[in-house]
Amino acid sequence: MKQKTPQVLLEFSNLSSFDRAELVEPLIESFDAEPDDEIKKAWAEEAEQRLADYRNGMADTVSEKEVFWAIKNHSKETR
């Protein structure tokens, strides 16, 4: 650990739980690498294609009722 790390941890532990919670998400996000432009472009193209398929009636869809039924029954199976 660097010399400043213990001091930062001490200061962090002295914050309210609300303030600590506000710091956790950006801290965790700082570990995530930003996706490169090719990945962003590929996902954007995929999303556009899926939307076009949906609008043209070419996508298989599932109703909200079916989704929640499947979730409910799956959770019973895994208990």
Image (cartoon, rainbow, N blue to C red):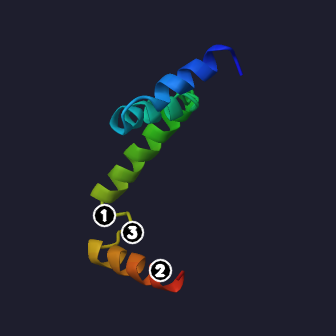
> In the rendered image of this protein, does residue 73 appear above or below residue 29?
below
**Which is more toward the observer, 64 or 1?**
1
> In the rendered image of this protein, does residue 43 appear above or below residue 63?
above
> In the rendered image of this protein, does residue 49 appear above or below residue 22?
below
| Picture residue at 58% right of the left edge, 29% below the top | 33
Secondary structure state at the residue bearing disc 1: loop
- Report the disc number at residue 72: none
The three-letter code of the residue at mark 2 reads His
| Picture residue at 55% right of the left edge, 26% below the top | 9
| Picture residue at 58% right of the left edge, 30% below the top | 31
**Which is more toward the observer, 8 or 75?**
8
Mark 3 or mark 2: which is in front? 2
The picture places residue 52, in percent across and down from the top left corner, at 34, 51
Label 2 crowd (10 A; few <14 / some 14-19 / many >=20): few
Please say if the residues under marks 3 and 2 sit with CB atoms less than 8 Å apart. no
Q: Which residue is mark 2?
A: 74
Q: Which residue is mark 3?
A: 60
Q: CA distance from mark 3 to mark 2?
A: 21 Å
Residue 20: quarter of image:
top left
Secondary structure state at the residue bearing disc 3: loop
The three-letter code of the residue at mark 3 reads Asp
Mark 1 or mark 2: which is in front? 2
First of labels 1, 2 by sequence position: 1
If the image is split into quadrants, where does the N terminus sit?
top right
Q: CA distance from mark 1 to mark 2?
A: 28 Å
Q: Which residue is mark 1?
A: 57
